[in-house]
Amino acid sequence: MIQKRWIGCGLALLTMGCSPVKPPPSPTPQTQAASQKVPPPAAIPAAAQIEAPVVTNVPVASGHPITSPRHISIEAAGILLDGIAFDSRTHRLEVADQPSGPGSQWADSQSAGRARHGIAAINAGFFTPEGAPLGLVVSAGTVRGGWNGASSLGSAVWYVDGGGRSAITRREKLGSASARRMSELIQAGPLLVENRSPVGGLDNIKSSPRTVLLWDGGTRWMMARSGACTLQQISQALAGASPAGWPVATALNFDGGRSAEIWISDQVTGGGAFTRPIWNKPVRNFLVLKPVSP
């Protein structure tokens, strides 16, 4: 009797132990939403904010008629200038940079100008022996290089702001933060002419071909390659002349010597040009002149 009772109890326990466990109810969309832990808004990382390009207070001279770009070859105080004059109301410069280094995309200014559908191009900023920019470069809003806060080769900047206006100014007037928010920018130097006067303290020993950008302070510009001269010589020559028919208010020096070159399309009034000696070296970037998009 005891044995039968024990066997009965054992069967009962075995039956209980093997009974299927009732599964939990299937989650509904409501219970799923309730069970998900959503972090509060402050805990969600914010997307990187892209700052809008800066719009600067560049004066716009409107008292003179717009003229078409034209090829100019002229002497100023005995220094040959071969370049192109233009009005930034109809034509604008843009930076053609080569992130992989000098010559990696374009062998010369002609190649860069044609590839970017421009009517002219010159070499632009300085670069290190390794091919990195020596100063800040902004191309179509993309920033490369670093702010050159010490060298005279980065003492000024040319830029196009968020409103499409172009200017040349000293680096301390613009500042690194604003410079990085420009649409286009090349940091270079030194300034050759400022407020229509020659800049003092420039070298008067080393004579080399120069690449320069001239500005009337409004919308009239000229970019040119010069014959061999010192920085002081070209500074004094430009401050006392009007090579494009208007007085030069500001002039900026770009990389020169074996980097100095210019290409002008034969479609430009006055005919084309391509000046690049065979001993020139590949450069990091160019300024390409293009019609302003409507």
Image: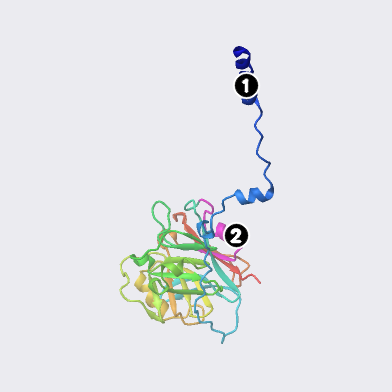
Q: Which quadrant of the figure contains the C terminus?
A: bottom right
Q: Residues within 10 Å of mark 2 (few under 14, many from 20)?
A: some
Disc on res. 160:
none
Give the image location of residue 196, x and y in percent: 41, 82
Q: From the image, which quarter does the N terminus lie in?
A: top right
Location of residue 21 with respect to 106 vertically, above or below: above
> In this picture, which residue range is highlighted in magenta?
104-122
Instruction: Where is residue 57? Give x, y as percent.
Output: 49, 79
Q: Position of residue 278 (x, y in %)?
A: 47, 55
Q: In the rendered image of this protein, does residue 89 appear above or below residue 260?
A: below
Q: Does the image show residue 261? A: no
Could you say which quadrant of the image residue 198 lies in? bottom left
Mark 1 Cα shell of 10 Å, populated few (<14), some (14-19), many (≥20):
few
Q: Quadrant of residue 115?
A: bottom right
In the foreground, 286 or 223 = 286
Give the mark toward the camera: 2 or 1: 1
Q: In this rendered view, identify the residue nearer to me: 230 or 223.
A: 223
Whichever of labels 2 and 1 marks the residue nearer the N terminus, that label is 1
In the rendered structure, are the residues bearing label 2 and label 1 in contact, judged by CB atoms less than 8 Å apart?
A: no
Q: Nearer the viewer, residue 240 or 157?
A: 157
Residue 88 vs residue 280: left or right? right
In the rendered structure, does residue 119 fall within the stretch colored magenta?
yes
Identify the residue under disc 1: 14
Q: Secondary structure at mark 1?
A: helix
Amino acid carrying label 1: it is Leu
Q: Amino acid at mark 2?
A: Arg
**Residue at the image point whose x is 65% and y is 39% from the top:** 24
Q: Residue at x 59, y 49 (%)?
A: 36
For the residue labelled by badge 2, is the local secondary structure a helix, a strand or a loop?
A: helix
Image vertical order of residue 209 relative to residue 243, above or below: above
Disc 2 designates what residue? 114
